[in-house]
Image (spheres, grey):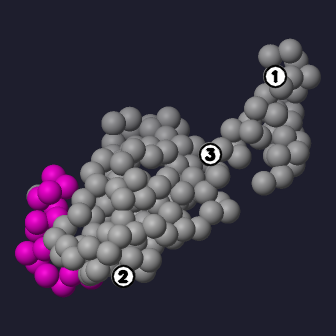
Amino acid sequence: MDLDKIEQGFKLMLEGMGEDPNREGLLDTPKRVAKMYSEVFSGLHKDPAQELGTFFAEQYDEIVLLKDIPFVSMCEHHFLPFSGSASVAYIPSDKIVGLSKLARVVEVLARRPQVQERLTNQIADTILTTLGAKGVGVVVQSTHSCMTIRGIKKPGSRMITSAIRGVFRTELAARTELFHLIGHP
């Protein structure tokens, strides 16, 4: 990540707003913004599949669910944050991962300019492909600043997306159990 370019770009934004980037309160702001962006977008140059690299051979063929994983991402359309939680489930074929690994996949993918629909699909596809799971289900709910503080200004509204793969898509009983466990009947 080129922090100098980000810093220069933010100075131009301040000038474009009619602000003086050399004013005392703003003097170090471009540097702080550049540092913040390197943190907020730290997932851009990471492979989320690497987070699932440590797994354990285990004969378990029921639902594994990690609910309510908090995340913050940045809407790529307005560069405003959206935040919420992801619930991630999978049915292992022959290997399981530590629960923190599922949260790490969410974190890496959320730390990119995103849209919620893509984020939801990327989480599901990463887990399905990397673990060879029999099924994956992901439900993401979040509040989008681009809709709550600007534009239509509808605070309190939430967006819910889901991505269903494998047996959760083909077997109604598995899908019903998944949504019951997540809490979405």
Residue 99 sits in quarter: bottom left
Residue 64 sits in quarter: bottom left
> What residue does disc 1 label?
26
- Seen as rendered, the residue at the extreme top is 24
Residue 132's tag is 2
Q: Position of residue 159 (x, y in %)?
A: 35, 52
Q: Report helix, strand or loop for mark 3.
A: helix
- Nearest to the eye among marks 1 and 3: give it: 3
- Given residues 90 and 164, the one toward you in this image is 90
Q: Quadrant of the C terminus?
A: bottom left
Task: Return the disc, 1 or 3, that comes first in the chain's sequence.
Answer: 1
> What residue does disc 3 label?
40
The residue shown at (21%, 81%) is 167
Task: Establish if 39 lies above or below 63.
Answer: above
Task: Return the disc, 1 or 2, that comes first in the chain's sequence.
Answer: 1
Q: Quadrant of the N terminus?
A: bottom right
Task: Return the disc, 2 or 3, that comes first in the chain's sequence.
Answer: 3
Relative side of 22 to 184, left or right: right
Residue 175 highlighted magenta (yes or no): yes
Q: Which residues are magenta?
A: 164-183
Q: Are marks 1 and 2 in contact (CB under 8 Å)?
A: no
Relative side of 62 to 105, left or right: left
Residue 37's tag is none
The residue shown at (36%, 59%) is 98
